[in-house]
Image: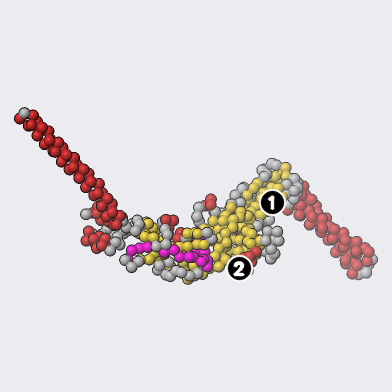
């Protein structure tokens, strides 16, 4: 019986210990489950308003702005001629080639001239005989020894001899093909030995200095168009090089169907440009030397309106962005002149604004030459929440 009692007592004790262990386990699980909740609550209470948006800033400043009108057109030469043969003979001497520059009146090609030369010399002989006859008849007429009709016939014969001489001289001259204008030979279609016929195109000559771009300007700009106004030309073939131009001529009429005005833009220096190349023409309609400017990169669009984000610091010194309406007065390729809402020196966001809203937290993109702060300086700025995270990281690396 004693043994039976001992076994019962041991079983109860073991059961009690088992229950205590279970209770302890439940208590530990409960404590561990409550701790993360408390930590999450604490973390939530310390969560900042939002992560600052990394942006690039630029200052509002004053400078020159232009109102320009952009058009595209091919370059063309106004002085361009095709040189044609004016007589029929074989070519015996070629004096120029394609690409050669020639002066007005310069001989380009000589043709065989035996027949023309003979005709001319014969006409000169006939002219001299007609002149002698006329002089004799004039003397007799002055002495009243011949009639008026005889004198008139002698004068007529002399005049006809002069005309024959001039005609044969012209035919002889035609055997030397000359340049009608100064310029550059761009085409040659004959070689020595070829039979050249009257009317055959032999050369083409272009005066490159006469190269222009003809653009069509909407009639709404008519009042702003003036002779000699500034223009700039750019060819995609030659990169971003800008060629200075000017308004050479303005058509006095408006093309009724298109509602445009033909404007001829000349070049101050042709450079490597050539007729046939396409160019973009910027016509400077107006310019202002001291305008308030904001970069076009800062502009964001909302429906039909344009905005820019200005940087400001709140009462805690934290950088934020404020959206400002932009009403443009003038605009060029890089800048806009706003009507109001901006002042010199203000900083505006030029990159990173796609993620911004009114009063969004921002931090400026670190400049390449920004100084590395010491630990003490970092601690002071961290206390005011004014140091960018990138600066903190770089300083920690140094330390």
49 above or below 85?
below
User: Marks 2 and 1, Cα distance to the nearest angstrom?
Assistant: 38 Å
Left or right of 349: which side holds 92?
right
User: Residue at position x 54%, y 54% from top?
Assistant: 235
> Does residue 365 show up magenta in the picture?
no
User: Farthest residue in the left direction?
Assistant: 2
Give the total of numbered labels: 2
**Badge 1: how crowded within 10 Å, few (<14), some, or many (20+)?**
some
Return the residue at label 1.
Answer: 82
Residue located at (40% from left, 68% from top):
345
Disc number for residue 248: none
Q: What is the x, y in percent for residue 213?
A: 61, 57
Task: State left or right for residue 121 relative to residue 291.
Answer: right
Residue at image location 29% in from the left, 57% down from the top: 45
Q: Is residue 99 left or right of residue 342?
A: right
Magenta segment, prevailing SS (helix, strand or loop): strand
- Residue drawn at (91%, 69%), measured in percent from left and top? 143
Find numbered disc 1 in the image and state the secondary structure of the residue it sits on.
strand
| Residue 29 appearing in the image | yes
Q: From what the image shows, is residue 234 above or below residue 11? A: below
Residue 280 or residue 33, whichever sits in front: 33
Looking at the image, residue 270 lies above or below residue 327:
above
Is 321 inside the magenta-drawn segment? yes
| Residue matched to label 2 | 224
- Report if residue 113 is visible in the image: no
Q: In this picture, which residue range is highlighted in magenta? A: 317-337
Among the two numbered marks 2 and 1 on one chain, the one whose residue lies closer to the N terminus: 1
* Quadrant housing the C terminus: bottom left
Q: Position of residue 47 (x, y in %)?
A: 31, 56
């Amino acid at each position: 019986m004693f043994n039976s009692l001992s076994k019962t007592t041991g079983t109860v004790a073991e059961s009690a210990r088992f229950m205590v262990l279970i209770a302890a386990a439940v208590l530990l699980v409960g404590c561990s489950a409550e701790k993360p909740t408390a930590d999450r609550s604490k973390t939530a209470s310390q969560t900042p308003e939002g992560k600052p948006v990394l942006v690039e800033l630029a200052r509002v400043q004053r400078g020159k702005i232009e109102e320009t009108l952009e058009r595209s057109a091919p370059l063309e030469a106004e002085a361009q001629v095709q040189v044609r043969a004016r007589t029929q003979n074989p070519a015996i001497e070629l004096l120029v080639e394609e690409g050669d520059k020639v002066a007005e009146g310069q001989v380009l090609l000589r043709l065989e001239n035996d027949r023309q030369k003979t005709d001319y010399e014969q006409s000169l002989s006939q002219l001299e005989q007609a002149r002698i006859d006329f002089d004799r008849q004039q003397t007799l007429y002055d002495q009243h020894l011949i009639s008026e009709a005889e004198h008139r016939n002698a004068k007529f014969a002399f005049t006809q001899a002069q005309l024959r001489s001039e005609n044969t001289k012209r035919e002889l001259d035609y055997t030397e093909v000359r340049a009608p204008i100064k310029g550059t030979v761009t085409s040659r279609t004959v070689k020595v030995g070829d039979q050249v016929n009257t009317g055959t195109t032999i050369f083409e000559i272009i005066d490159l200095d006469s190269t222009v771009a003809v653009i069509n300007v909407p009639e709404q700009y008519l009042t702003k168009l003036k002779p000699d106004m500034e223009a700039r030309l750019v060819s995609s073939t030659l990169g971003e090089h800008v060629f200075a131009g000017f308004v050479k001529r303005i058509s006095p009429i408006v093309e009724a169907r298109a509602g445009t005005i033909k404007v001829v833009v000349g070049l101050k220096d042709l450079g490597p440009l050539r007729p046939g190349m396409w160019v973009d023409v910027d016509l400077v309609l107006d310019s202002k030397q001291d305008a308030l400017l904001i970069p076009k990169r800062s502009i964001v669009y909302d429906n039909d309106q344009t905005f820019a984000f200005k940087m400001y610091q709140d009462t805690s010194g934290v950088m934020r962005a404020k959206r400002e309406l932009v009403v443009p007065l003038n605009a060029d390729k890089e800048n806009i002149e706003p009507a109001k809402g901006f002042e010199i020196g203000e900083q505006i966001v030029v990159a990173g604004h796609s993620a911004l809203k009114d009063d969004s937290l921002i931090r400026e993109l670190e400049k390449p030459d920004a100084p590395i702060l010491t630990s003490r300086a970092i601690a002071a700025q961290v206390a005011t929440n004014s140091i960018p995270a990138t600066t903190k990281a770089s300083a920690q690396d140094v330390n």
